Amino acid sequence: MNPTEDMIDATFPAPQVSELSAPYWKALDEGRLTFQRCQACAHAWLPARSECPRCLARGPLWETASGQARLVSWVVYHHTYHDYYATRLPYNVAVVQLAEGPRLISNVVDARGELRIDMPLEVVIQREAGTALVRFAPASRST
Amino acid sequence: MRGNVVIAGIGQTAYGKLPGRSTVSLNIEACRNALHDASVEKNAVDALLVKPPTSNPQFMYGQTLAEAMGMQPRVGGAWDQGGAANISLIAFAAMAIEHGQCDVALVCYADNPRTGSRHAYEKAWGDDAAYGWFGVPAGYAMLARRHIEEFGTTSDQLGEIAIAIRNHGAANPHAQLRKPLTLDQYRESPWVVDPLRRDDCCLVSDGAAAVVLMSTGRAKSLGITRAVPILGFGQGQSSSDVAQRTDLTRTCAEVSGATALQMAGLRPQDIDVAQIYDCFTITVLMTLEAYGFARHGEGGPFCTGGRLQIGGELPVNTSGGLLSETGMPGLQLVLEGVRQMRGDATSQVKDARTCIVSNQGGIMHTHSTLVLGNPV
């Protein structure tokens, strides 16, 4: 372990799991990325909501994502706003769009070459301080 | 209602570090100065509208301020819309005056994040903190990256925006940061969140500003000769967080600007000077595109060649904006618009007859636009 990591009060900023979001985090813990789809109009989205933001219907259903996605945009942090990330600078945070439509905040891992917008990605579920997180790697990695 | 309501007075505090001052105290100083500038007595004011302090939002803040000012206004309160709220409150006051709901309105804003807490600008974005997603600069960096990759916008082009505005700030004796900027210095400026450098980011400042509004007729009857008419205003709300937006390079600034220009009966080419909310350089670039000064995606080249500097085709943020005058979220831009229309700005644009002012909040979640003209 890097000796500096011991000296930092670096508590992982874990998700605040609510009744609404619990199914998402449970599925991720079981190795499945899921999203919500409206039963009335078929609109799909993340994060968890109680009503469809398009047609306002209640009671969306959870659906498992294919894991195929594309990179919408990304940034690279050179300044830390939280001690947990202090030893990881520089690190990236990305906006990713799933093939099914929902967009989410994530990280791109295992990118050997340059990142570029709209590049194909695929899901990688990784554990961080015991919490399953959804990250993405370049899709070409496994093809 | 074009031109029926005027900004009759403006006031501000010093900008920068103001230790030991509450936001109420700062607001009162700015209001006192604005009333003095307009030659209006406090007792004539029957509307008090305030944007709540970003760093410390409080319940019923508008009433707290009114009590401290010994006022029982007919119209009063606070409106949370992030940085767009200043102009939205001015627009609301103008409509209220037009329709007889009040006669003289004060619109003000104060905050003290520099000596107080800057947590509001650095906090986690909900559960996405697990991915390291923190802070306001990163949100704008996410928009900037998409613009850079999609349209070939360059870091140097963002730098030209910072240079123009910083140089205007350097000429303003009231500016918090009076250090001009060169392209070489900009290129050496460290990354905060790539693709944004330190010099792409606004200041964090204590301070307050205020404006006095009334009908054109009342200003004439009071003998106020430097009253600046409001020619147009408009709003737009993108609302969605960055990750939820279908197009990261387009925002509600388009509908806001179009509404304001239509009301004013003007086109972008009729605008002589612009005060564009510059929390980050990319915000200026995207707002100028949204207002129609440049085509979508062509804001980068538009901002080069000195076009945004005094003497250029469209001087921007002539008192230094958020990058240089004060990091205050937006009302200082209205004050500078008023000075340009009066003709008494520090860096005065010669024969300026029209000024457009943008205010916006969140990560371009909200937008409000004001168009001002010369005193009549």
Image (cartoon, coloured by chain):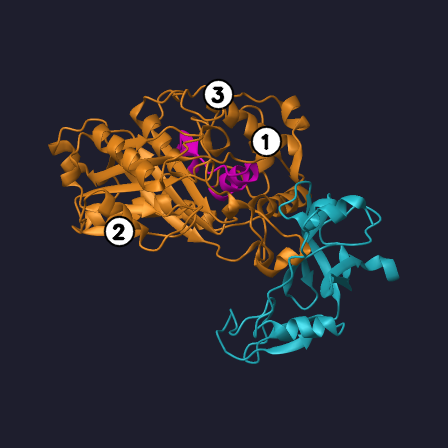
Chain colours: A cyan, B orange
Quadrant that contains the C terminus of chain B: top left
Q: Secondary structure at mark 2?
A: helix
Give the residue pinned by disc 3.
B170
User: Label 3: chain?
Assistant: B
**Where does the image place residue A36, in percent across and percent down from the top left?**
61, 73
Identity, as a three-letter code, of the amino acid under mark 1: Asp
Give a yes or no on whether discs 3 and 1 share a subunit.
yes
In this picture, is A122 found above or below B123?
A: below
Q: Give the Cα distance between marks 2 and 1.
A: 38 Å
Give the residue pinned by disc 2.
B63
**Where does the image place residue B366, in percent across and percent down from the top left?**
45, 50
In this picture, is B147 found above or below A47?
A: above
Q: Secondary structure at mark 1?
A: helix
Identity, as a three-letter code, of the amino acid under mark 3: Ala
Q: Which mark is residue B334?
A: none
Per the image, is B233 magenta? no
Give the residue pinned by disc 1.
B199
**Where does the image place residue A95, in percent across and percent down from the top left?**
66, 55
Earlier along the polypeptide chain: callout 3 or callout 1?
Answer: 3
**Where does the image place residue B247, in percent across and percent down from the top left?**
59, 54
